[in-house]
Image (cartoon, rainbow, N blue to C red):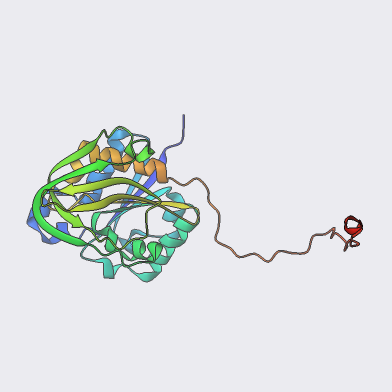
């Protein structure tokens, strides 16, 4: 029986403490609903962590344990300590997977790994979103069909300040006419990264079965394959060094 993929579902969990509309949809927090979706589909060992947990929920031990981290943040990006961002970045470069969700596009960790602004246009009117599959053979799109229909969503629009994705799995269309690169794959160092935009806190998007399938598929795709420490070793002289060879010029003779 294959080992379960270890997933840390990290969430800033601030809106749920301040906004009644969010509390009604996610009474225990977005992280609990994402974790429940992974557990429902199976094949995962899931832990959750939030910004207000001890050590902000991020320690060397938990990052060594995790095969993948999912990251949701919005109103408290600045509260994430730079030392925690550096720890997650190092873990990704050494092989851990990372799923950046919705407004996590503007998180410190996504900006650090992309090296760009990661800015975009947005509009919150509860308009319809259609998430089109543009790489149907990609593992993250498995079982999704042609598209995902979301009756209410926050619009994210181009230009999106990211590097050109290595694979563009989804592109979203919105009722107002905007389009957006909503499912983007990257590799950084030895780790895989997937950005997925649907998931505004005032809409029940993380309960949607196809959204849960995408997150499950993405965790499988991004899961750690190697664990290679980030070092810069000095290459020593071999014990049996090859002596200098006599220069052979014989092929120059007519």
Percent from the top left, x then y, of residue 146?
25, 35
Residue that sits furthest to the top in the current view:
1
Place of residue 18 in the rendered image (x, y in percent of width and height, measured from the top left): 12, 61
The total of numbered circles placed on residues is 0
Q: Measuring 24% from the left and 54% from the top, which residue is drawn there?
A: 102
Residue 63 image offset from top left, x and y in percent: 43, 55
Q: Residue placed at 11% from the left, 48% from the top? A: 175
Q: Is residue 96 visible?
A: no
- 225 to the left or right of 202: right
Horizontal side of 64 relative to 229 (left or right) equals left
**Which quadrant of the rendered structure holds the C terminus?**
bottom right
Q: Is residue 146 visible?
A: yes
Q: Position of residue 241 (x, y in %)?
A: 84, 60
Q: Residue at x 30, y 37 (%)?
A: 39
**Location of residue 251 with respect to 117 vertically, above or below:** above
Looking at the image, which is closer to me, 148 or 15?
148
* Above or below 222: residue 147: above
What residue do we see at 13% from left, 51% from top? 177
Q: What is the residue that sits farthest to the front in this orientation? A: 254
């Amino acid at each position: 029986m294959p080992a379960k993929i270890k997933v840390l579902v990290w969430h800033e969990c601030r809106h749920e403490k301040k906004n009644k509309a969010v509390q009604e949809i996610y009474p225990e927090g977005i992280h609990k609903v994402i974790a429940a979706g992974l557990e429902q589909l199976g094949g995962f060992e899931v832990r959750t962590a939030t910004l207000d947990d001890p050590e902000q929920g991020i320690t060397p031990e938990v990052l060594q344990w995790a095969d993948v981290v999912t990251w949701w943040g919005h109103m408290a990006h600045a509260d994430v300590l730079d030392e925690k961002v550096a720890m997650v970045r190092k873990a990704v470069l050494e092989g851990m997977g990372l799923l950046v969700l919705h407004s996590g596009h503007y998180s410190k960790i996504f900006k650090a790994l992309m090296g760009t602004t990661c800015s975009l246009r947005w509009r919150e009117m509860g308009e319809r979103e259609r998430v089109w599959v543009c790489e149907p053979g990609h593992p993250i799109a498995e079982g999704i069909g042609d598209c995902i229909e979301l009756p209410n969503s926050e619009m994210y629009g181009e230009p999106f300040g990211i590097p050109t994705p290595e694979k563009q799995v989804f592109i979203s269309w919105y009722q107002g006419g905007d389009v957006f690169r909503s499912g983007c794959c990257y590799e950084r160092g030895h780790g895989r990264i997937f950005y997925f935009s649907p998931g505004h806190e005032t809409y029940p998007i993380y309960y949607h079965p196809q959204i849960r399938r995408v997150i499950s598929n993405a965790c499988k795709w991004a899961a750690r394959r190697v664990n290679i420490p980030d070092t810069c070793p000095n290459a020593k002289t071999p014990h049996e060094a090859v002596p200098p060879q006599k220069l052979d010029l014989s092929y120059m003779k007519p």
